[in-house]
Image: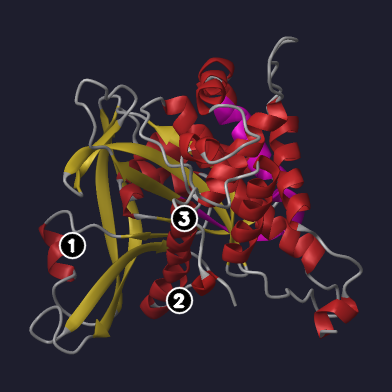
Amino acid sequence: MTKHDQQADGDIHEDQLLNFLVNALTGAFGVSLGENADLDPEDIYEVLVGATADGTSISTLCDRSKDSSSSTNILRHLRTKFDLETVTTVGNTLLQEYTLDVLPEQVEIVIDLHLRPYYGDEDETDGLYYSEAKDGTTAFHAYATLYARVRNKRYTLAVRRLTDGDTASSVLAEFLGLVDRFDFEVKALYVDSEFYDGKCLTLMQAHNHAYVVPVIAWGNDIQQELSEGWSREIDHDLTTEFDGHEWTVEFPVMIDCTYKMGRYDEHSVARHGYAVDAPFIDTPRQARRHYSKRFGIEATYRLSESSLISTTVTDQTRRLLFVVISLLLQNVWRYLHWEYVATPRRGGRRLWWWPFEEFIRMVTRAAWNALSVRRSIPANRPPDDRFER
């Protein structure tokens, strides 16, 4: 018997993880299929959770399953029973349900934009987001995400689909308004360089949040500052326009220099500039170190990409639903890890080793069992003794 077993009061089995996720989706999205429907909402969510954990398409999973409804039937219900506004509103409420209760009184907030390249038909680009060329395209399925960062763990609080015409400042204003309604205190706000402009800096100052934003070298002055000298703090400003009026926002910029043998300029010096307004940051090195915490968000995206329903559809409602479920799996894993797996003890809980990859494998196996996914294939002759041991 392991030390873990000695301190545990019970077990959570794979099928219970699947039940938890299906129940969460069923309770959040009140889908009515009618009396004559040949499946229940739980049947739909069972397939959605299974395909998400397996990282496969709905069609592939249904084709390999004996007990699931046909993929055509499930996709028809997804197309007719879900609308974009409901998925957006209910999805964010569902993400917050398994997040807010486990957050401490003070958290760090991260806001990020994530662009998934679109390479499809140019005539089917409604609802896409256009940005600078990346990975060979300027059209993207784009999402803005709001995270709470606590002890190196990231909890998704909201996800927002971006469309052409959305601006960084409009996204930031919406998310900051949402954050103001939460009970926790914001220690600091970390946003990526997409939010480096006068409107966004003005918004963060107006909400009185400490913030760190990487600087973009717009203009000769800041380009000169980032091309010479050593670590230091300077004053900088940006001029922006709104409703025909111009104003200038002033802010400190911390420039941190690092030495990289054989890289960057002729002296192998890399200079990183950050717009900083935070009482706990006194030096450029601290600015870079604190902002580096944000890079953990990339791990969230990697996890999301590995546990996301594969699809080629352009329907934005379904794509957003798939993203919400993917992020929900991460939130539920962290919630269960903290509330059920961690051992209470003096000085803080002990988090037993339970990586997200294992959680995903457990959910996948449970879905395979529930749907009777094919475990054998036809053979034109019986296996010989090489298949035995």
Q: Kindly report the distance in space between the C-alpha atoms of the residues bearing marks 1 and 2.
A: 21 Å
Viewport quadrant of the C terminus: bottom right
Task: Pick whichever of labels 1 and 3 is earlier in the sequence.
Answer: 1
Front of the two marks 3 and 2? 3
Mark 2, residue position: 282
Q: Residue most toward the bottom?
A: 261
Front of the two marks 1 and 3? 3
Task: Pick whichever of labels 3 and 2 is earlier in the sequence.
Answer: 2
Using the image as rendered, state which of residue 389 and residue 64 is in the foreground.
389
Q: Secondary structure at mark 3?
A: loop
In the image, what residue type sits under mark 2?
Asp
Label disc, if present, on residue 381 of the rendered structure: 3
Q: Secondary structure at mark 2?
A: loop
- Give the quadrant of residue 316: top left
In the image, what residue type sits under mark 3?
Arg
Q: Where does the image place residue 259, in percent across and percent down from the top left?
A: 23, 87
Q: Secondary structure at mark 1?
A: helix
Q: Where does the image place residue 350, in percent across and percent down from the top left?
A: 77, 76
Instruction: Residue 18: say if magenta.
Output: no
The boundaries of the magenta stretch are 87-111
Instruction: Residue 101: say if magenta.
Output: yes
Q: Residue most toward the left?
A: 266
Q: Kindly report the distance in space between the C-alpha atoms of the residues bearing marks 1 and 3.
A: 73 Å
In the image, what residue type sits under mark 1?
Ile
